[in-house]
Image (cartoon, helix red, strand yellow):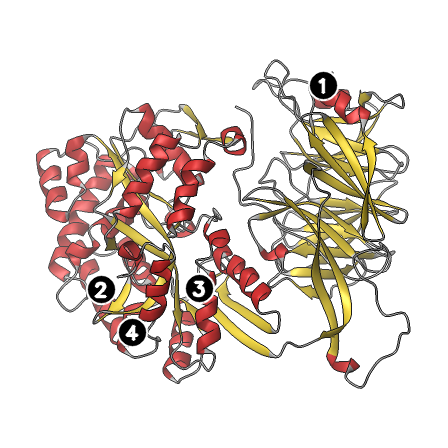
Amino acid sequence: MKMKKICSLLMALTLAAGLFSGCGRQGEDGGKDKDAAAKGRYVEQEITLPEGAGEAVGIQKQENGLELYTRNENGYHSYIYQNETWTDSGDIPWMTDARDRLGLPIDHIYSGKDGNIYGMAIPASDDVSYGQHILKDAGDGTALDCTPAPCLEVNEEGWTDLLVDMAVLENGTMVLVDMNGMVKFYQGDKKIGEISEILPIVSDHQNVMAVSDERIAIFGKDRQSIEFYNQDNQEKTESVEVKQELVEAMLVPGEAGIWYLVNSKGIQRVTEQGSIVETVMDGTGVLMSMDSAYMINFLWGNDNEFYGLYSIAEGGERLMCYRYDENVKAVRDETLSVYGLKENQTVSQAIYTFQNMHPEVKVDYHTASGSGETPASEAIRTLNTELLSGSGADVLILDGLPAASYMEKGILTDLTDLAERLSEKGVLMNVVGNAVSLSGKTYAIPARVSLPVIFGEEAKVNACQNPDALHTYLEQNPTERLFGTTTHELAGMTLFNTFYPELLNEQGGLDEEKLARFLEDWMKLCEVQNTRVIEEEFSSEIWSKMNTRFSSGLALRNDPVMIEEIDGLISTMVPYTLARDSAKTPESLKQFYIPQVIAGINASSKQQELAAEFVECLFDEAVQKGDNSDGFPVLKSALDYLAEYVETTEAQNLCGSTSARNPETGEDVRIDVTYPPREEVNQLIQIIEGLSVPFMQDGMVADTVLSEMENCYSGKQSAQETAKAICQKVDTYLAE
């Protein structure tokens, strides 16, 4: 199975003014008016690509301009951009030759310090061993495969080296990064050195290094530092801590000793000798902050002007210039604040849309933690205190927050009128309109929904419908497993969430007696499932690292019944493949849906109108079409687009695999996956359109249950004692 990207798309790109004509120049007279101190910041400007140019493969710097490389069915082509004008510079014979004669279509280009342009390509035919090849112009219009011979040796899986990044030094030495996280140096076919301490590799094409005239800069394995190496002897010279996640970042050399770090946060300036990271441009509201924009190339100009070429998930490419505009106000006239517990790409995309509508408004987006981190309960308490005192952000993303309590305490603005407008635009209000409502009024609207699906043996599927059904099943089948390979956390929390509505009392808290019986049944199930043996190899802390609420096992092809939460097309790959293999069809679990990206407006906000416009941007079709792994779209046109997308060439070429060793049998299990076919996606869309039961659970409740279940599982307290402790803590929290 050929590897393709399945991780989130990388983002990036940049700004400034000067070297290349056409992106905009600073005023020639150099004069400054009396307001100059309050003016001047970097701005984003799009450069329209040449009409009919085909797919953009990359950009490279020319002495007085920019060169764009493109491809279509006829071959590879280039265009020169100077003085705000594109000039057709003709075909690129050697690149076309690489595709047509060698079967190696070039996907990425690199500018070598030796003066050559290099291409990286994956064989187009399954007859050739899978792995990247490096090519350049042989000098006669044909392509020369200059991949070092050791990189083309075929391993046991039938692959050659999987290279993810490369550079070429002035003396022709190749610096190659492979999927194992090794940096290797080659002169011809001879390896002359290697570096192993680099950032973990998560994608089949990942920017992890850059080369200046003197240094090689590589992201460190701690994911938050940059290591600098001497080119001559590969010795480390400096290490700079940047204290931010670097998996989705790019590093670009600037002036001597200066480097630019580019990610969703913006453009930041880093020096080889210093530890201070200076923000050159805030990424909020520009293309680099959008998860659906994958950066193809990024270039820096001598006068601090930057160009970024992006591939857009919805299709096509965009070329952006970032320049310093001394006439733009340094501080925008108004500020709209947005707050959520975790970073979210749908919110970032909405900010981009909103910012284009309101360039005069600064969007201040703050979160309690990163997208992959768990916010501390203290952050929730602090926010609650702010909101009750009449302060807090204008727009609230309520995922993980006590939305019901906020409604009751008058913290949220009535959005009923906005909901009606969204319904007219095609938002599925029958699905999401009752997620955060009180007395017939809507107080928040989820921009996405994820949903748990279930499939498997009929009797065992029925056992997962309610606590009584589980209890009866265990009494009648005391030695028979319900799930496949699983841990006590996965089985326990998935079943607790499945039965959550039945475990509540009339006051909205948990029923202690029902909870105690459930915990007893769960402990019996853990014994049958052999969880303690499984956890000797698989961590018992898997659940805390997940962002989902339903996942019954480890998906090792041995699931009598499987419950899995899907939150976008990519997340359907594994469960739908397993269901298809077992001749089953995934179905809705109790008509549950999990509201995601739940947007509300602070009733105390002085920016009610702007806040409503921002919320509306979350439902813009371009934003809704993004597959950000934070839920399915709730706009009908964007939902229908999913069925169209899986039939595109891009989607059909996207594939992946999961693999693990079964700790009980010792068997290595590998599952090759693709998107579901259109017929299955249409069935999924029908399920989404018919969902009717919002699964709303306070994050504090889930954390409490998980923590106390550990005490029960370890034998520190009985099921009854655990149930009592959970109910007391939950009741106290809800009372606050």
Q: Earlier in the sequence, mark 3 or mark 1?
A: 1
In the rendered structure, the answer to whether residue 607 lies left or right of residue 446 reads right
Reading the chain from its start, which is encountered first: label 2 or label 4? 4
Label 1 sits on what residue type?
Asp
Q: To which residue does mark 2 refer?
A: 725
**In terms of secondary structure, where does tag 2 sit?**
helix
State whether residue 563 is above or below residue 429: above
Which type of secondary structure does the marked residue at label 1 adopt?
helix
Q: Residue at x 65, y 41 (%)?
A: 206
Q: Which residue position holds label 1?
A: 100
Q: Would you identify the image quadrant in which residue 524 lies?
A: top left
Q: Quadrant of the C terminus?
A: bottom left
Identify which amino acid the numbered label 3 is placed on. Answer: Glu
Give the mark toward the camera: 3 or 2. Answer: 3
Query: Residue 69 versus residue 169: which sits nearer the camera?
Result: 69
- What is the number of the mark on residue 616? 3
Mark 3 or mark 2: whose residue is earlier in sequence: 3
State the separation of the CA atoms marked 3 and 2: 42 Å
> What's the CA distance linking mark 3 and mark 1?
48 Å
Q: Report x, y in % for residue 497.
A: 25, 52
Relative side of 281 to 497, left or right: right
Indicate which disc, 1 or 4, sits on the residue closer to the N terminus.
1
Task: Give the Cα distance between marks 2 and 4.
Answer: 27 Å
Q: Amino acid at mark 2?
A: Ala
Tell me whether circle 2 and circle 4 mark residues in contact (CB < 8 Å).
no
Q: Nearer the viewer, residue 231 or 604?
A: 604
Mark-to-mark CA distance, 3 and 4: 20 Å
Nearest the camera: 61 or 517?
61
Q: Which mark is residue 407?
A: 4
